[in-house]
Structures are given as structure tokens and as C-alpha cells.
């Protein structure tokens, strides 16, 4: 029977990779040694890890599969690009063979092919979406909700976006620039930042551009981190006291060594499925390390909510085409099926406490 959707994924750490492999090996076997895992992993062809069922709050369900592309977590760098593209192509071919009507390209699988499904095998009736429009929607919802909860005036805020010239970063910039006082755009290449800055300025926004992250980070009240980093290595120094920081990278952008800056940090771009999500075998805890149930990344959720909506179309594709109108449309589709902003959390668990404390302070 044709599947409604497929999700193409890869793991962001060796711990997560080991967990996925243990699911595939089945119960009762001793854990695989770390050295063996690292040697073996790159040789595993893409394959289904589990079946997934997602239920709309309207009552109906869709069925799909979670396919791991088996990109080794320490080989996301540019030097491995060609071999990783081959893995994404193989995972896409697998999804097509499974008969998926729509495929979400999770994490680096869309970055590697720059959202261009023409680089994937001939798809027949299968369509691909990067999932980045729902990701942007959830990041923007998170910023608005956190600012509201902390009594912050968005109009008075300076917003810094790290990875601003990327697909997710530019989508966030287009949505939020009209709402804040000033936007600071950061990435490594100046030309793409300047193009985006010109576009935002023509819409009336106050925009600054910098390739030197630390130079302007002390001016930011809100920071969105959406750089395509191969590991969590970003250090934000000299943040403003009480800055709001949203890390939506996969792998995460911020280094765990970033320490305890006086800021509210939450993981962004995540949604919660209120109608329920079922995995067969039950690997939810293996795949998603969140302190709340039924949480998934926006990029994964987008294909699933489009399937619930019966819209089998490449909603998000290419790079730099995400507009506020499309973000609004995708947010409305997700909301209709009960996919909402995930509760605020980070590596230490829920951030509600931080929220309440700050609310007390602002009273
Ligand atoms: N939470 C979710 O559900 C979700 C969904 C989709 C994507 N993501 C994650 O979001 C991030 C961005 O994805 P994308 O599709 O927008 O990628 P993208 O289009 O490739 O853009 C990446 C951006 O990061 C910048 N960048 C790369 N290295 C950098 C560095 N060292 N310092 C500063 N900027 C740097 C790039 O510009 P330069 O090359 O000029 O530096 C570019 O602006 C990735 O981590 C991805 O996995 C998360």
C-alpha cells in the first residue's frame, strides 16, 4: 500500500546513532562497541527505522516511514559533501520505492542538495519538501510567545540572526524584520547578507550586516541561531543581560561550553502534535530527546501536516523563497491539524521556570 509520507533523517550525535542502530538490531543484544559503530555506520545503506502514524486533531491519521540516511555525525563537513549527497539520493530512492507520496528532507539532507529536488532520483508521483517553511513558522511563533511571556516589547528589540542568509534564516528575517526595531544579519559570506539586507531595507526595516558575530552580539535583545554548523560550536560572547536566544540548528548551533550567560535559551523550530504520534516499533524516545511528548522538528512535521491536509506538493523547495505569506499559510495548516509550538525547553529541560522567574521580575 502506498505510504502517505516519508521522513529522511540523520543523527546529530554518536549516542543517537548508537540508539538507532540498537533499534535496528532488535532487543536483547549487547550494545555495539563505539569503535565498531563508527566503522560500521558509514557502510549501512539508508533504510526504514520505524513506521510512523500521525493523527490530526480533526480525527484522521496518516501513515509513513522514518528513513535514516546514515550520515556519520562527525562527517557533516564540506569535505564529505559528495558522499553525503550520495546518501541523501539513496535515501530518496528508498522513499520513492516505498511509494511515499510526500517526503520531508530533515536537517542536512535538504542543505546538501540546497533544497533542489532535481538533484534527487526521478521521483514519479513522489514529491519532496525541505520542511523549512514550517520550521520558520515555529521559530517565529516561539520568539513571539517568549517575548509576550516575558513582557518584552518587540518594537524596541534588536534581533540578531546567525545564519541569516540561509533558507531558514532569511525566512525568519522576512517575518520578523517588520516587527522589531533593528535587525542584525550574520553569516560568513557578505554578498548574500547584503542582498537580503537590501530587500529588507526596501521594506522599511533598519538592518545591519556583519560577518563578525562578536562585534554586534552585545547589541542584541533576541538571537536566532540557524547556521548550518556540523557540530554545536557557536560561542556568543557579551550578550545583553536577559537576552532571548533561540537555537534552532540541527545539529544545535550553540556550544555546550557557551556557559551560563544571563539569557533565556530555548530550542526552536519544534512542534508538538496534540492529536498524537505513534511509532512502530516504539522508538520515539530514541529519535527525539525532548522533555515533552510528541515533539518533532518543523522540517519533519511539514511533510506530515501536508499529508494530513491532502496537499501532496513541494511546499518548500530551493533556497531563499520563504515569504511571510507562505509561513502564515503553513502555520495555519499545521494549527488546523493540532500541530502547535512545542513547550519551551533546552538541554537542561523545560524553561518554564525561567519564564516564571522573569515574569515575576518584570511585574
Ligand atoms: N529545527 C528544525 O526543525 C530545523 C529545520 C530545518 C533546518 N534546521 C537547521 O537550521 C539550520 C539552517 O538550515 P538552512 O536550511 O537554512 O541552511 P542553509 O540554507 O544552508 O543556510 C545556512 C546558513 O548558515 C550560514 N553559516 C554556515 N556556517 C556558518 C558559520 N560558521 N557562522 C555563521 N554562519 C554560518 C550560511 O551562510 P555562510 O555560508 O555565508 O556562512 C547560511 O546563512 C541547520 O542547522 C539546519 O539543520 C532545523
Image (tube, helix red, strand yellow):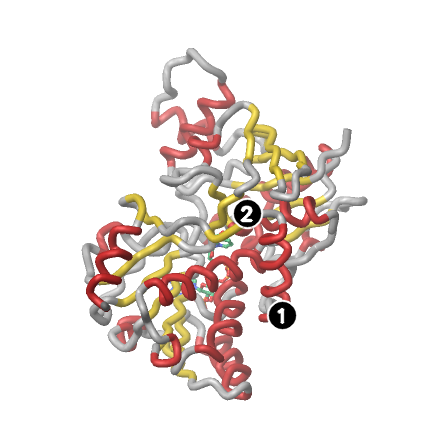
Query: The N terminus appears in which quarter of the rendering?
Result: top right
Question: Horizontally, is 231 left or right of 296 in the view?
Answer: left
Q: Are marks 1 and 2 in contact (CB under 8 Å)?
A: no
Q: Earlier in the sequence, mark 1 or mark 2?
A: 2
Q: Is residue 208 left or right of residue 337?
A: left
Q: Residue at x 39, y 82 (%)?
A: 181
Above-or-below relation of 80 to 189:
above
Viewer can see residue 10 = yes
Q: Is the residue at mark 2 in contact range of ligand 1, meaning its CB lies under 8 Å from it?
A: yes
Res. 82 in view = no
Task: Looking at this view, name the residue that lies furthest to the front.
Answer: 363
Quadrant in the picture for residue 317: bottom right
Residue bearing the label numbered 2: 106
* Of the two numbered discs 1 and 2 in the rendering, the one whose residue sits closer to the viewer: 1
x and y percentages locating residue 116 in the rendered image:
66, 57
Within 10 Å of disc 2 (Cα), the crowding (few <14, some 14-19, many 20+) is many
Residue 48 image point, x, y percent: 60, 30
Classify 296 as above or below 36: below
Q: Residue at left 60%, top 65%?
A: 328
Q: Which mark is residue 228?
A: none
The structure residue drawn at horizontal position 42% and vertical position 11%, both measured from the top left corner, is: 28
**Is the shortest distance between ligand 1 and the CB of mark 1 under 8 Å?**
no
Which of 15 and 173 lies nearest the eye of the viewer? 173
The x and y percentages for residue 304 are: 63, 44
Please give the residue where the numbered disc 1 appears in the rendered image: 325
> Residue lying furthest top in this view?
28
Counting other residues with Cα less than 10 Å from the Cα at mark 1, is it few (<14), some (14-19), or many (20 or more)? few
Helix, strand or loop at mark 1 = helix
Is 278 drawn above or below residue 157 in the view shown? above
Left-right relation of 210 to 121: left
Amino acid at each position: 500500500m502506498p505510504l502517505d509520507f516519508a521522513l529522511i533523517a540523520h543523527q546529530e550525535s554518536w549516542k543517537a546513532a548508537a540508539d538507532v542502530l540498537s533499534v535496528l538490531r532488535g532487543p536483547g543484544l549487547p550494545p555495539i562497541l563505539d569503535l565498531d559503530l563508527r566503522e560500521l555506520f558509514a557502510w549501512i545503506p539508508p533504510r526504514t527505522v520505524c513506521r510512523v502514524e500521525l493523527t490530526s486533531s480533526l480525527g484522521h491519521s496518516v501513515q509513513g516511514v522514518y528513513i535514516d540516511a546514515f550520515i556519520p555525525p562527525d562527517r557533516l563537513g564540506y569535505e564529505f559533501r559528495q558522499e553525503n549527497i550520495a546518501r541523501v539520493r539513496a535515501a530518496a530512492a528508498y522513499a520513492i520505492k516505498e511509494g511515499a507520496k510526500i517526503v520531508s528532507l530533515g536537517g542536512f539532507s535538504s542543505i546538501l542538495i540546497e533544497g533542489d529536488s532535481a538533484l534527487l532520483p526521478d521521483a514519479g508521483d513522489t514529491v519532496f519538501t525541505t520542511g523549512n517553511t514550517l520550521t520558520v513558522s515555529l521559530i517565529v511563533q516561539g520568539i513571539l510567545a517568549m517575548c509576550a511571556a516575558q513582557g518584552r516589547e518587540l518594537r524596541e528589540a534588536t534581533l540578531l540572526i546567525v545564519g541569516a542568509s540561509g533558507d531558514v534564516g532569511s525566512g525568519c528575517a522576512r517575518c520578523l524584520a517588520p516587527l522589531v526595531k533593528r535587525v542584525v544579519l550574520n553569516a560568513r559570506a557578505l554578498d548574500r547578507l547584503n542582498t537580503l539586507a537590501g530587500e529588507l531595507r526596501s521594506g522599511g526595516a533598519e538592518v545591519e550586516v556583519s560577518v563578525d558575530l562578536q562585534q554586534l552580539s552585545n547589541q542584541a535583545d533576541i538571537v536566532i541561531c540557524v547556521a548550518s554548523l556540523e557540530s554545536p560550536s557557536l560561542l556568543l560572547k557579551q550578550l545583553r543581560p536577559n537576552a532571548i536566544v533561540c537555537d534552532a540548528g540541527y545539529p544545535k548551533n550553540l556550544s555546550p561550553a557557551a556557559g551560563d550567560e544571563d539569557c533565556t535559551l530555548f530550542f526552536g523550530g519544534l512542534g508538538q502534535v496534540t492529536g498524537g504520534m505513534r511509532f512502530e516499533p516504539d522508538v520515539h524516545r530514541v529519535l527525539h530527546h525532548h522533555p515533552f511528548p510528541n515533539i518533532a522538528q518543523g522540517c519533519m512535521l511539514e511533510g506530515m501536516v501536508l499529508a494530513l491536509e491532502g496537499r501532496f506538493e513541494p511546499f518548500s523547495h530551493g533556497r531563499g523563497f520563504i515569504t511571510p505569506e507562505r509561513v502564515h499559510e503553513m502555520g495555519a495548516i499545521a494549527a488546523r491539524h493540532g500541530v502547535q509550538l512545542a513547550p519551551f525547553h533546552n538541554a537542561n529541560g523545560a524553561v518554564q521556570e525561567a519564564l516564571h522567574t522573569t515574569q515575576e521580575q518584570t511585574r
